[in-house]
Image: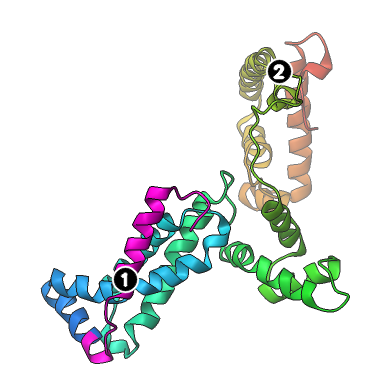
């Protein structure tokens, strides 16, 4: 049983396993008949009979995933959800056995559960990372079984190549699998009341700096608006297009729009920036208080 199962859960799991193993298997024809009765007529009795016959698949998958340290009962419950999803989606027209189809859904449900609960830190988000999480132990064991071989950089490169991930992903996942979650509230020593979180530095600006930055930013916006108002309409349009857009226009594009050469646009832009600088410097005591891209 899973390492977190208590005695009550263990008895419940054993009863569930015994009941599943006592149910008879179905033939292909019986599977198809039950699946069609459920899908076409909503026959819940047929659904229970179909699902009950293959609950043993849930148990087999749960046993294979038990080394991740999660309760066996929870794994079987998640696998049962996957089995129900398989029953609701099974199409007899594909001419495949229900057991084959259901195995994928059961495995997928359990893997999603493991990824959500194995650690408080989200472990895998992409398909490649999920594949790495569930295959790294197996591949590492194969490599370490070879004479004179170990999980060195060559072994990690082999894993990365086989699973189609980067070497960095392999190293990061290896570290995640070998390190347990640790609380930030744990004491740093046996005789200390200090917690680990007390030694973590906060890289963010303090409230005073944030308030100053917000206030100064607002002032600069007001000064810039006043300075722009002193420009001619053409100079203002050039500054807006070149400097105040995320994807600024090129000199050639503006020249085509304004009907002048790109060199003339450059001259107008340079003159407008000079005017802006003079205008904004009137509001400050030190030139470094204003950031201008000239």
Q: Is residue 109 magenta?
A: no
In front here: 60 or 31? 60
Circles 1 and 2, Cβ within 8 Å, touching? The answer is no
Q: Is residue 23 magenta?
A: yes
Q: Nearer the viewer, mark 1 or mark 2?
A: 1
Q: Quadrant of the C terminus?
A: top right
Q: Residues within 10 Å of mark 2 (few under 14, many from 20)?
A: few
Question: Could you tell which of marks 1 and 2 lies nearer the N-terminus?
Answer: 1
Residue 245: x, y in percent? 62, 40
The quadrant holding residue 145 is: bottom right
Residue 193's mark? 2
- The answer to whether one can see residue 56 in this image is yes
Residue 20's mark? 1
In front here: 19 or 244? 19
| Image point (35%, 88%), residue name | 96
The quadrant holding residue 234 is: top right
Residues drawn in magenta: 1-30
Residue 4: x, y in percent? 50, 49
Q: Is residue 205 above or below residue 20?
A: above
Q: Which SS class for mark 1?
A: helix
Mark 1–mark 2 Cα distance, whole angstroms, equals 52 Å
Tell me if 35 is positioned left or right of 154 in this view: left
The quadrant holding residue 289 is: top right
Tell me if 224 is positioned left or right of 63 in this view: right
Q: Which SS class for mark 2?
A: loop
In front here: 164 or 51? 51
Residue 28's mark? none
Q: Is residue 159 above or below residue 286?
A: below
Tell me if 292 is positioned left or right of 76 in this view: right
């Amino acid at each position: 049983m899973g390492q977190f199962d208590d005695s009550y859960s263990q008895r419940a799991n054993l009863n569930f396993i015994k009941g599943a193993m006592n149910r008879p298997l179905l033939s292909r024809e019986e599977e198809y008949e039950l699946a069609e009765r459920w899908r076409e007529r909503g026959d819940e009795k047929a659904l229970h009979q179909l699902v009950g016959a293959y609950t043993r698949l849930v148990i087999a998958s749960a046993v294979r995933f038990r080394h991740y340290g999660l309760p066996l009962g929870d794994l079987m419950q998640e696998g049962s959800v996957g089995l129900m999803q398989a029953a609701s989606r099974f199409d007899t027209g594909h001419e495949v056995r229900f057991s084959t189809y259901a195995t994928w859904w059961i495995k997928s449900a359990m893997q999603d559960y493991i990824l959500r609960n194995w650690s408080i830190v989200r472990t895998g988000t992409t398909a490649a990372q999920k594949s790495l999480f569930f295959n790294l132990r197996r591949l590492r064991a194969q490599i370490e079984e070879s004479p004179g071989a170990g999980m060195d950089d060559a072994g990690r490169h082999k894993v990365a190549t086989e699973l189609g991930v980067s070497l960095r992903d392999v190293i990061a996942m290896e570290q995640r699998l070998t390190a347990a979650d640790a609380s930030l509230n744990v004491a740093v020593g046996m005789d200390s009341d200090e917690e680990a979180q007390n030694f973590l530095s906060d890289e963010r600006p303090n409230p005073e700096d944030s308030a100053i930055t917000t206030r100064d930013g607002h002032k600069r916006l007001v000064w810039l608006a006043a300075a722009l108002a002193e420009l001619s309409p053409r100079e203002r349009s050039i500054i807006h297009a070149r400097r105040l857009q995320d994807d600024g226009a090129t000199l050639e594009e503006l020249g085509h729009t304004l009907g002048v050469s790109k060199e003339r646009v450059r001259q107008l832009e340079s003159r407008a920036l000079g005017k802006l600088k003079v205008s904004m410097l009137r509001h400050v005591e030190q030139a470094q208080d204003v950031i201008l891209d000239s």
